[in-house]
Amino acid sequence: MDYLPLFFDLKKRRVLLVGGGDVALRKARLLVRAGALVRVVSREVHEELDDLVELHGGQVVIGEYHPGLLDDVALVIAATDDEALNERVHYDAVERALPVNVVDNPPLCTFVFPAIVDRSPIVIGISSGGQSPVLARMLRAKLETLIPKSYSRLGQLVGGFRDQVKARFSSVNDRRKFWEKILQGEVAERVFAGREDEAAAMLEKELNADQGEAGVGEVYLVGAGPGDPELLTFKALRLMQQADVVLYDRLVSPEVLDLCRRDADLIYVGKARDNHSVPQQGINALLVEHARNGRRVVRLKGGDPFIFGRGGEEIEELKAQGIPFQVVPGITAASACSTYAGIPLTHRDYAQSVKFVTGQLKNRTSDLKFDELVHPNQTIVFYMGLHTLDKLCQGLMDHGKPGDTPVAIVSQGTSPDQRVLTGRLDDIVERQSEAQLPAPAIVILGEVVDLQSRLAWFGQTEGAQADA
């Protein structure tokens, strides 16, 4: 290591900041967040820097730097564009054995500022040793997206229980196991869901419980999106990687399933149109059973749990049985597949509204209100409509929808095998009969489909536009 990572406690301690410009202002913002008392010296001082230092009990010295300003300080920073002055500050600080940083000049630094991910009390510093600050900032940006801000609230919560846990468990290993259970379990999830009071009560209960007891687990209804694993949300991925049991359906891609925790129990509960491996009541029972056994259960659904995913039915049962649950939205097929096909669902010139419609109703008919679907200037997206495509097209035309209305079928959308078939309302059935695009697929109807030939960017397209 070029530098040993350390964290300074600067609360109520004096820090000398030489310089009064924008760079000095950026450093001062960090210092006051750490509770430091900042002493700024410069011939001219940025107005915002002046206000910031005064607000946080610091001191602004208008004038020239001199070694006497180093008295009673714990840290020194030089942030000027005067190289000679920066060198003087460096040598004076080193002579007094004071840590010193000269901005953008690693040879004159005895410490460097890392790129910081602040989830206080959790703080992460990333440093390149001054070799590549841009790379350090890029890595920081990645960590910012991977570590939710709610980790700050979690750190504060567990910090408040630290002494109690230490008193409860005399063994370091026992304390470690307890905290691992808390930080990877339902207490943490309550915090992430913004329910800190519940989390504190649950942590208190865990602390006083017989550690051999198994409490009630939790169920997470997670939207897996349309297939591309990069479309998962961060929350979905986090819950998938800590689940003890995963119940997944047939629309969940292998690539997404592969991101679940390696030692989780994977249970297939897929449902094809006329072949349900596990009926819905059986799925509900499995969710309740595993949660009551104290397990964390992910119900992994293709697309979004609340858009033709029967998520509402499942959480009704969980609610009735007193099982805690969370719902994590996923990118639904209509949005993802249309985007990957190059078909905007709304467009100022063509469609001012969009409707999501199932081609398969509860009674297995397509008893749709076609009169509501034939209005102009709207886009219709049919889920599970491939097997009733002929009935859908005929019903729309019988109710006045023009036969030349553009239609697209997007098969296996967002996957490497994505195919798009375009045509018209009066010929798409024949085209699909020839092309035999496989399920899962969505059907998009409306003038926006005409844009596909210009905006397509992913997958294979065939049909009317491709022939043109």
Image (cartoon, helix red, strand yellow):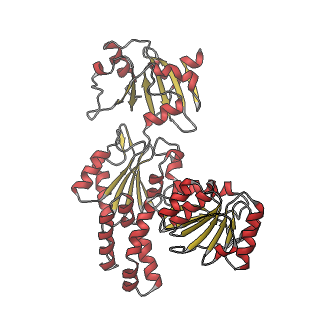
Residue 395, x across and y down, in percent: 32, 18
Query: 199 and 443: which one is in front?
Result: 199
Does residue 202 appear in the picture of this structure?
yes
Figure quadrant of residue 135: bottom right
**Residue 366 vertical position relative to residue 146 in the rendered view, above or below:** above
Which quarter of the rendered picture does the C terminus lie within?
Answer: top right
Which quarter of the rendered picture does the N terminus lie within?
Answer: bottom right
Residue 6, x across and y down, in percent: 61, 73
Give the residue at x 52% y 56%. Answer: 146
Residue 160, x across and y down, in percent: 38, 74
Give the residue at x 64% y 73%. Answer: 69
Give the residue at x 66% y 75%. Answer: 68
Residue 115, x across and y down, in percent: 61, 60
Query: 293 and 56: which one is in front?
Result: 56
Query: 150 and 175: which one is in front?
Result: 150
Figure quadrant of residue 14: bottom right
Give the residue at x 44% y 43%. Answer: 251
Q: Is residue 200 left or right of residue 245?
A: left
Does residue 184 appear in the picture of this structure?
no
**Residue 321 vertical position relative to residue 278 in the rendered view, above or below:** below
The number of numbered badges drawn on the structure is: 0
**Residue 167 vertical position relative to residue 368 in the rendered view, above or below:** below
Which residue, as the protein is rendered here, is positioned at the far left?
320
Query: 434 and 151: which one is in front?
Result: 151
Which residue, as the protein is rendered here, is positioned at the far bottom?
170
Q: Is residue 185 left or right of residue 85?
A: left
